[in-house]
């Protein structure tokens, strides 16, 4: 009886092991098949300037119509009112650009300079002032995240429609900053001058408030924003460590922002300081800030009470007939659909030593490699979507909701090494475009990332090259 019982026991163990191995095999196979499905739907091997413009696979006829409509309104310029082109005549009266692609060249990052060396339209100047505690200021802080400069508003407009003076012209001014590695190698960084006289000139509506914070911003690449839009608030909040309870020196926090779409507060996902909770919100805000297009989420023209010509300027035909907004709900939805349904370039990692170094020096503390979506798909954006203190040198003096002047959302790194393909020139990195390369961007890191920067600087030359090569493969 004992021998039989022993045999049965061994038989049961063997059966259990077989079941475990079988289940494990099919789980791995299922995960593998899932990622194959993801690659087929969401990734592209395109290696020319259109690599960020491909639509995801499997769209229905109705979805394809929305994609095409959104692409049209994203790419084709808007015109000033009055015009025979009544579907697109809401531009201005004050504006910086006349089309979305101005700030997202081939859906990539903005260009910093025009061919003549002057600042390009995708390089914008944001304005804000400290709150004085008044009811009006507190309302702006609650619903906009900042207090706009009273005469010029929240962003400088480089252009005005007929009989409406533009607001100001921009300058890009730097001084050199020499960095010396411990091994003796030297590199010269471009340090932006922060006085407003070094950023703006020819102001048309008088002086700025003397307490104005002036923040230079570059239009960000649209790579993978539709996939990041699928992340839940819960997933982002799970990575918070506001009080650095694990003692690793990293204390990321989510920005909690107001959504005019849902009339509530939720986790911010997009913009340099994570002030937009969704792609639709970001599209609507950009349309209003850059082109002064009224829409269901941002209903007012970009005119302050001091700008009489702007207030009295002709409005688009859409306001008189089709809709009370320049950008209607249907067209806003279509543009958001277009941006949400773009493929990402497929990543091929060959620099495994660089990958190990990336983790070893602590880059993954903020640039979290992976998220799993509700669909089961794994995405690798290399961001935690949280705000981090990046040090005084990267401070822009501007707060947005919970984001302090030193804090920035961790920039997604996927496809960063391919920005130049879409842009057809070397990209300018960081929020103000001061970094001419990934290496320079790393050397500007401070605050919570200071230790990682020091570890990077102490690597051997060949190790630094390996790590940068890995980042450019993501």
Image (tube, rainbow, N blue to C red):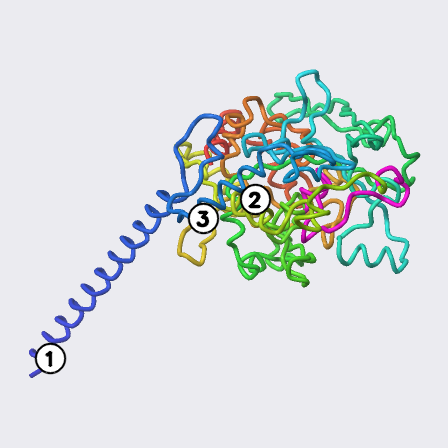
Q: Are marks 2 and 3 in contact (CB under 8 Å)?
A: no
Classed neighbour count for the residue bearing mark 2: other residues with Cα under 10 Å, few (<14), some (14–19), many (≥20) = many
| Up-down relation of residue 223 to residue 278 (above or below) | above
Question: Is label 2 or label 1 in front?
Answer: 2
Calculate the distance from the C-alpha at mark 2 to the C-alpha at mark 3.
12 Å
User: Which residue is identified by label 1?
Assistant: 5
Q: Where does the magenta region start and end?
A: 285-310
| x, y percent for residue 182 | 62, 27
Instruction: Pick whichever, 140 or 65, lies toward us.
Output: 65
Q: Residue at x 51, y 30 (%)?
A: 417
User: Which residue is identified by label 2?
Assistant: 335
Which residue of the protein is positioned furthest toward the top in this rendering? Answer: 116
Determine whether, in the image, residue 83 is placed left or right of residue 154. left
User: Which residue is identified by label 3?
Assistant: 63
Q: Are marks 2 and 1 in contact (CB under 8 Å)?
A: no
State whether residue 213 appears in this view: yes
- Labelled disc at residue 461: none
Q: Residue at x 74, y 27 (%)?
A: 191
Determine whether, in the image, residue 81 is placed left or right of residue 454. right
| x, y percent for residue 36 | 32, 46
Tag 1, which secondary structure? helix
């Amino acid at each position: 009886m004992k021998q039989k019982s022993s045999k049965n026991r061994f038989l049961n163990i063997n059966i259990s092991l077989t079941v475990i191995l079988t289940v494990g095999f099919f789980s791995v196979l299922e995960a593998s098949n899932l990622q194959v499905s993801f690659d087929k739907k969401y990734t592209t091997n395109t290696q020319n300037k259109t690599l960020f413009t491909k639509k995801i696979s499997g769209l229905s006829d109705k979805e394809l119509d929305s994609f095409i409509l959104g692409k049209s309104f994203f790419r084709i310029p808007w015109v000033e009112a009055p015009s025979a082109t009544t579907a697109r005549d809401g531009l201005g009266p004050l504006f910086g650009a006349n089309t979305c692609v101005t700030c997202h060249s081939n859906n990539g990052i903005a260009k910093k300079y025009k061919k003549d060396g002057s600042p390009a339209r995708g390089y914008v100047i944001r304005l804000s002032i400290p709150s004085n505690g008044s009811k009006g200021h507190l309302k702006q802080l609650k619903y906009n995240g900042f207090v706009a400069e009273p005469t010029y508003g929240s962003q400088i407009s480089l252009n005005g429609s007929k009989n409406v003076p533009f607001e100001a012209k921009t300058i890009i001014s730097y001084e050199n900053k020499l960095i010396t590695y411990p091994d003796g190698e030297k590199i010269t960084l471009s340090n932006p001058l922060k006085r407003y006289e070094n950023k703006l000139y020819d102001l048309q509506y008088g002086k700025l408030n003397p307490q104005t914070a002036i923040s230079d911003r570059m239009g960000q690449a649209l790579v993978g924003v539709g996939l990041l839009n699928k992340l839940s608030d819960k997933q982002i909040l799970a990575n918070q460590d506001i009080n650095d309870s694990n003692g690793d020196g990293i204390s990321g926090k989510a920005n909690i922002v107001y959504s005019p779409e849902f009339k509530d507060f939720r986790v911010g996902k997009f913009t340099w300081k994570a002030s937009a909770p969704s792609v639709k919100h970001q599209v609507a805000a950009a349309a209003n800030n850059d082109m002064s297009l009224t829409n269901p989420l941002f209903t007012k023209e970009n005119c302050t009470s001091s700008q009489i010509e702007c207030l009295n300027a002709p409005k688009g035909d859409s306001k008189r007939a089709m809709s009370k907004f320049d950008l209607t709900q249907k067209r806003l939805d279509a543009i958001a659909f277009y941006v949400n349904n773009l493929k990402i370039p497929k990543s091929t990692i060959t620099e495994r030593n660089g990958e190990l170094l990336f983790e070893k020096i602590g880059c993954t503390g903020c640039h979290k490699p992976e998220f799993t979506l509700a669909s089961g798909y794994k995405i690798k954006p290399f961001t935690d979507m949280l705000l981090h203190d990046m040090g005084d040198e990267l401070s822009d003096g501007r707060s947005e909701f919970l984001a302090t002047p030193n804090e920035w959302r961790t920039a997604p790194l996927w496809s960063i090494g391919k920005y130049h393909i879409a842009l057809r020139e070397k990209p300018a990195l960081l929020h103000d475009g001061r970094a001419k390369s990934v290496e320079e961007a790393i050397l500007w890191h401070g605050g919570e990332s200071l230790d990682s920067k020091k570890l990077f600087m102490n690597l051997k030359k060949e190790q630094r090259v390996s790590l940068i090569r890995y980042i450019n493969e993501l």
